[in-house]
Amino acid sequence: MFGDKMQIIVAMTVYMAVVIGIGLYYARRASESSSNYLIGGRSLGPWVTAMGAEASDMSGWLLMGLPGVAYWVGLSDAIWTAIGLFIGTYLNWLLVAKRLRGYSALAGDSITIPDFFSNRFKEKKKIIMTIAALFILIFFAVYASSCFVTVGRLFSTLFGIKYHYMMVLGAVFVVFYTFIGGFLAESASDFMQGVVMVISLTVVLVFGIKYSEVSRL
């Protein structure tokens, strides 16, 4: 048991060191301009953009939330949840992402979504910008909080430490490497996490199928 925990600690230490290293690597480039810091200078390729966005969006949900839904309410609900999210994500990339990428550059080289809406409709009183910013603040605060709760629950289960402490520690870690490296560091680390997620889910699927076959014998 102690050996298993040590392996987890070593793996997580290496992972955190790599992520902080990514933040330090991009720190100088991110500090060159607000565009570099906030949107990576519009220089990210499609693989980093896609993998980074989906890893950031779905990591806690895919690895803990969806299995929890399947366990709690049944496989059918989890499957329909996954199908709905897949369709919504695909349509978002197909219909919105490319146009937003092009139009945001034309609309005063907008960096944020509220900034884009404000420039797009050439408003003077910034009403649309304020409403859009409030929407993002409220709903992403809830989403980010759920991700931190996931981190806290996971490490509380692994190490037996009160989950509130682990949640705060996870939040501090994320804020730290994002602060020093900006969007570039966040995207690069999320790309790495996306690759790890794909490999992990594939391994779990293969071993799950093999285990089920062995248990039938």
Image (cartoon, rainbow, N blue to C red):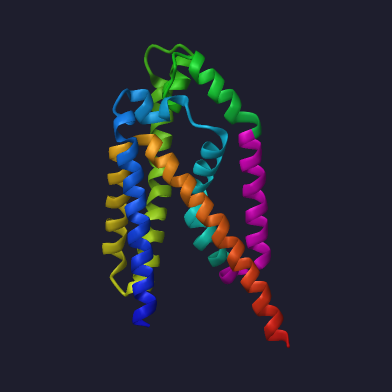
Q: Quadrant of residue 32?
A: top left
Provide residue 184's location: percent of width, then percent of height: 40, 35
The part of the image, by quadrant, that contains residue 71 is bottom right
Q: Is residue 100 left or right of residue 157?
A: right
**Left or right: residue 179 compared with residue 69:** left
Looking at the image, how many numbered discs can be counted on the residues?
A: 0
Q: Quadrant of the C terminus?
A: bottom right
- Residue 82 lies in the magenta-colored region: yes
- Residue 207 falls inside the magenta stretch: no
Q: Residue at x 63, y 42 (%)?
A: 88
Residue shown at the point (68%, 64%) measured from the top left = 76
Residue 5 lies, with reference to residue 39, above or below; the image says below
Nearer to me, 94 or 202: 202
Question: Which of these two is toward me, 40 or 104?
Answer: 40
Quarter of the image with the N terminus in it:
bottom left
Q: Where is residue 92 in the image (x, y as percent from the top left)?
A: 61, 36
Determine whether 163 is above or below 190 in the image. Answer: below
Which residue is rendered at x = 55% and y = 25% of the image? 100
Magenta segment: 70-93
Asked whether residue 139 appears in the rendered view, the answer is: no
Query: Is 43 drawn above or below residue 13 in the view shown?
Result: above
Q: For the point 40% across and 41% down, which residue is it?
A: 186
Most prominent secondary structure in the magenta stretch? helix
Side of 193 where 209 appears, left or right: right
Residue 177 at x, y = what percent? 31, 44
Residue 70 vertical position relative to residue 84 in the rendered view, above or below:
below
- In the image, 202 versus 119, the foreground residue is 202
